[in-house]
Image: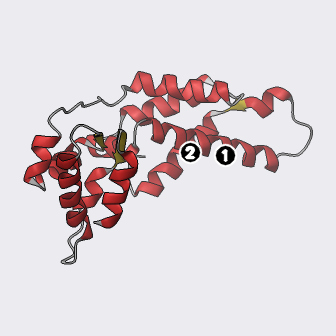
Amino acid sequence: ALKVKDVCKKASGGVLFIDEAYSLTQSTSSSDFGLEAVDTLVKEMEDNRGNLVVIAAGYTNEMRRFISANTGLMSRFNKIIEFPDYSEEELIDILRLMAKRAGYQLTAEAVMVIKCYVEEMTPNEARDFGNARGIRNLFERMVTNQANRLMSQKGVRSVKALTFITRDDAMLAVKENIASHGWNLL
């Protein structure tokens, strides 16, 4: 409770942003400090209505449970803005932009592998994927796979070889991502 009061005091006159706010109410422990923190937050929001803006962010379903965990939250978070997930095309555009900014080029086959992967996800898998974060993680895996592939090859590498991410780099990234989530897509 004291930490919440302190954070609210520091944010006074400004904005307090709470990412993954639902984590405060997800504990099943009998000594639940999260619910105490929420109670304190509600009081601070009421006592500082004119001086404090609180934005809570997170996944839609978890945020609904968060807001319903305390009767005071619903009336204080009375404006809800829901951002839709990126489409498959937007995720591929984000991937291409990440590659370009990092100085890499994706082969058409590498893009097709990622596109197929994203399109074939179930809704639960897509939710766990994390949208742009999931694409960033895939891209980082592809870069690592490309570096490992090039290190295993003998001889001089061309600039093209150093900058291209191939189908194999993407396939391995997808397999690694599936394994890390415990999914079974391929």
On-image quarter of the N terminus: bottom left
Q: Look at label 2 and name its amino acid.
A: Ala
Q: Look at label 1 and name its amino acid.
A: Asn
Q: Considering only vertical position in the picture, is 183 above or below 135?
A: below
Tell me which numbered mark, 2 or 1, is placed earlier along the sequence: 1
Q: Considering only vertical position in the picture, is 67 above or below 39?
A: above
Mark 2 vs 1: CB contact within 8 A = yes
User: Could you tell me if residue 31 is visible in this image?
Assistant: yes
CA gap between label 2 and label 1 equals 7 Å
- Residue 74, numbered label: none
Q: Position of residue 8 (x, y in %)?
A: 33, 51
Structural crowding at the residue carrying mark 2, measured as other residues with C-alpha within 10 Å and reported as few (<14), some (14–19) or many (≥20) = many
Q: Secondary structure at mark 2?
A: helix
Q: Which residue is farthest right?
A: 156
Q: Position of residue 70 (x, y in %)?
A: 11, 55
Q: Which residue is farthest bottom?
A: 30
Q: Position of residue 32 (x, y in %)?
A: 22, 72
**Residue at the spot of label 2:** 173
- In the visual, does 150 lie left or right of 124? right
User: Could you tell me if residue 106 is visible in this image?
Assistant: no
Identify which residue, 54 or 12, lies in the foreground: 12
Q: Which residue is farthest left?
A: 71
**Residue at the spot of label 1:** 145
Q: Residue at x 29, y 29 (%)?
A: 84
Structural crowding at the residue carrying mark 1, measured as other residues with C-alpha within 10 Å and reported as few (<14), some (14–19) or many (≥20) = many
Identify which residue, 150 or 93, lies in the foreground: 93
Identify which residue, 13 or 27, lies in the foreground: 13
Q: Position of residue 80 (x, y in %)?
A: 20, 33
Q: Considering only vertical position in the picture, is 121 above or below 68?
A: above
- In the visual, does 49 lie left or right of 55? left
Q: Quadrant of residue 3?
A: bottom left
